[in-house]
Image (cartoon, grey):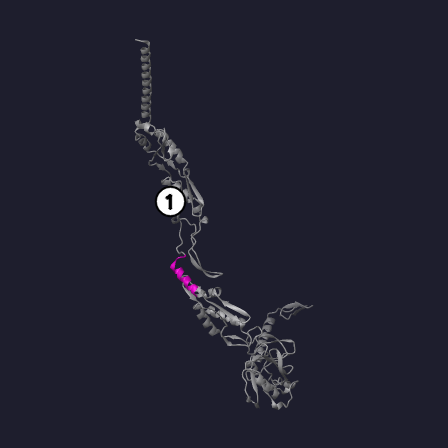
Amino acid sequence: MSRRKRRARVLRRSLLLALGTVLFLIIGLYVYFGFYFRSHFFYQTSIEDIDVGGMTAEEAVEELRLEVKDYLLVMQDRDGNKHQILGRDFDYDYKPFGEEEKLIEGQSSFFWPFHLAKDKKLEMEKSITYDEDLLKEAVFSLDCLKEEQMQKPQNASIQMTEEGYKLIPENQGSYLIKDKLYARVKGAVDAGENEFTFTDDLYEKPQVTAKDPVLSECMAKIQSFFGAEITYDMGEDKEVVDKSVISEWITVDENYNVSFDENKAASFVQSLASKYNTYGDERKFLTAKGDSITIGGGDYGWVVDKEAEREQLIQEVKNGEVKTREPLYSQTAVSRNKNDIGSTYIEIDYTNQHLWYIENGTIKIETDIVSGNISRGNGSPDGVFKIVYKQSPAVLKGETYESDVTYFMPFAYNVGIHDASWRNGRFGGTIYKNSGSHGCINVPEEIAEKLYQTVEKDTPVVAYYRESVKLTAENTKIANSYSYYDEEKEKAKEEEARKAAQEAASNTPPLEEGQRIAEDGSIEPIP
C-alpha cells in the first residue's frame, strides 16, 4: 500500500471520529435539554409578562410571588385626583395550585430546539389571595370617601338672582357610593388590574337635571312675563318695568308653580304715584316780586289713576308688550317738568292784596284785590289750584248773601275771582282784614273782563299769604288749603300732650335741692 493511500485512510478515520464525537455531543445536548425542559420552562417564556425562561415551577412561583407583593392599584376620580391602594395593606399574595408544573409538562420538552428563537407567552389562572376585610378597610379609608371631602349632588333649580329668576344647572358633586366603589375596587383586584378611572355610576346623582320638563315649563312661563318692557315717560324722568322689576312680581313655589302677584304690581303703581304725584305738594315758588316762597296744599297737580294704571300694567306685562307711554292719570297739570305749574298762571299775594296774570313768563295783567275777611274767619284759601270753569254772568249765593256778578272764575271749591261793583273802585291795602269778602277774590270789573277773555280753563292759580294765618272756614278745609287750621284736631293734640306731661310728672321722683324739671320732662341740675 502506498504512503498516499495510508494517509488518506488515516484522514478518513479522523474525520469519522470527529463527526462521531460531534454527533455524540449534539445528541447528548439534545437529550440533556430534553430532560432539562421537562422540569424547566423554555427560554423566552413569560407568564403574565413575567420572564420565567429557564426556571423551574418552584422558581417561577417565587418570581410571581415577588411580583404580586409589589401590587399597586391606582385610581383616578372624575376631578382628576389620584388615589392608590397597596397590595401589602390587604395581604395581597400569590398562592400556587400546581398550574406552573402543568405548563411545564405541556411543553413537549424534546421539541425544545424549535422554541429557542421564539418568545412564548403563557396564560394561566393566577391564584391570588387577600384579606377582604382589610381591602374594605383600605377602600373606606381613602380620602375621597371622607365626608368632609365629598360634596353632595345638587338638583337643578330655579332661583331668584340679582338678574331675576334663573335656571341653575345641577351640580354633580363628588359624593361616592361606598359599597359600589368597594365592589369596583374588588373587581379590579380580582382581575389583577393596576389602574382604573371612577365612572359616573360610582357617584350619587342629582335627582333633577336642567332638562327636567317641570323646570323647563316653569322657565317658559317666567320668560313669557320677562318679554315685557314698559317704559314710563315721566317728563324729565323715565321709569322702566323690565325683567329686573317683573322678577319681583313673580312667585315660584316649591313645586315650581308660577304665579303672578298682582299686589306687587299694585305696589309698584303706588310707588310710582308716591314719587310723581304732585297733588297738594309743597313747592318753592318764585313770586312776581322776585323772592321765593314755599306753598303747598290746594288741589292742583298730577295724580296717577292707580286702579286703572294697575289693570293696564298687569295686562301689558302678561301680554309681553314692549312700549313707551305715560301712566294713566286721574288728574293732570300743565307741565310734566318738576315745576309743574309752568310759565303761565295766576298769582295771588293775599298779604299784599295783589294779583298778577303771567303768560309765558311775562306779566300781562295785574291788579289790586280784596280777598276774604280774615277777622270774620273768611280768609281766602291758599295753595295751588286751577281755574275750574268760567261763567258770565253769575249769581253768587251763600247762607247770608246773594250777589250778581258779570264774570266769575272759580278755582277753589266755591271760591273764585270775580268783579265787585259794590267796592266802588276801592281795592288793595288792608280792606280785606275787616271788610273783606266771604272768601272770593274781588277785582275791578275791567280786570275781571280781561281775565275772563284771556285766562283759559285749567290755568294754575298760586295763592299765598306771606305771614302765618289760621284758616278755619269750611271752604278752606274742602279746598285743602295750605294754612287750614283744624281747631278740634289741634285741641285734641294739645290735650294729649297735656295728659302725657301729667303722666310724666306723676312718675317723676321728688326734686332734691338744686334740681329742676327740664323741658323734655327729665330732671336736671339748676345752673
Residue 185 visible in the shown view = yes
Query: Which residue in the structure is indicated by mark 1?
Result: 184
The N terminus appears in which quarter of the rendering?
Answer: top left
Q: In the rendered view, does 193 fall on the left or right side of 401?
A: left
Vertical arrangement, residue 295 with respect to residue 141, above or below: below
Q: Where is residue 20 in the image (x, y as percent from the top left)?
A: 31, 18
Residue at (32, 20) in percent of width and height: 23
- Of 470 and 259, which appears nearest the observer? 259
Residue at (33, 32) in percent of width and height: 100
- Of 491 and 425, which appears nearest the observer? 425
Residue occupying the far top of the picture: 1
Residue 335 in which image quadrant: bottom right
Vertical arrangement, residue 32 with respect to residue 187, above or below: above
- Of 116 and 310, which appears nearest the observer? 116
The amino acid type, in three-letter code, at marker 1 is Arg
Residue 199 highlighted magenta (yes or no): no
Q: Position of residue 46 (x, y in %)?
A: 36, 33
Q: Give the range drawn in magenta.
A: 210-224
Q: How crowded is mark 1: few (under 14 residues within 10 Å), some or many (20 or more)?
A: some
Residue 213 highlighted magenta (yes or no): yes
Residue 271 visible in the shown view = no
Vertical arrangement, residue 185 with respect to residue 364, above or below: above
Helix, strand or loop at label 1? It is helix
- Of 423 and 390, which appears nearest the observer? 390
Q: Where is residue 513 in the image (x, y as percent from the top left)?
A: 67, 68
Q: Main secondary structure of the magenta part?
A: helix
Vertical arrangement, residue 179 with respect to residue 28, above or below: below
Q: In the rendered view, does 43 fall on the left or right side of 320?
A: left
Residue 191 in which image quadrant: top left
The C terminus appears in which quarter of the rendering?
Answer: bottom right
Q: Where is residue 86 in the image (x, y as percent from the top left)?
A: 42, 39
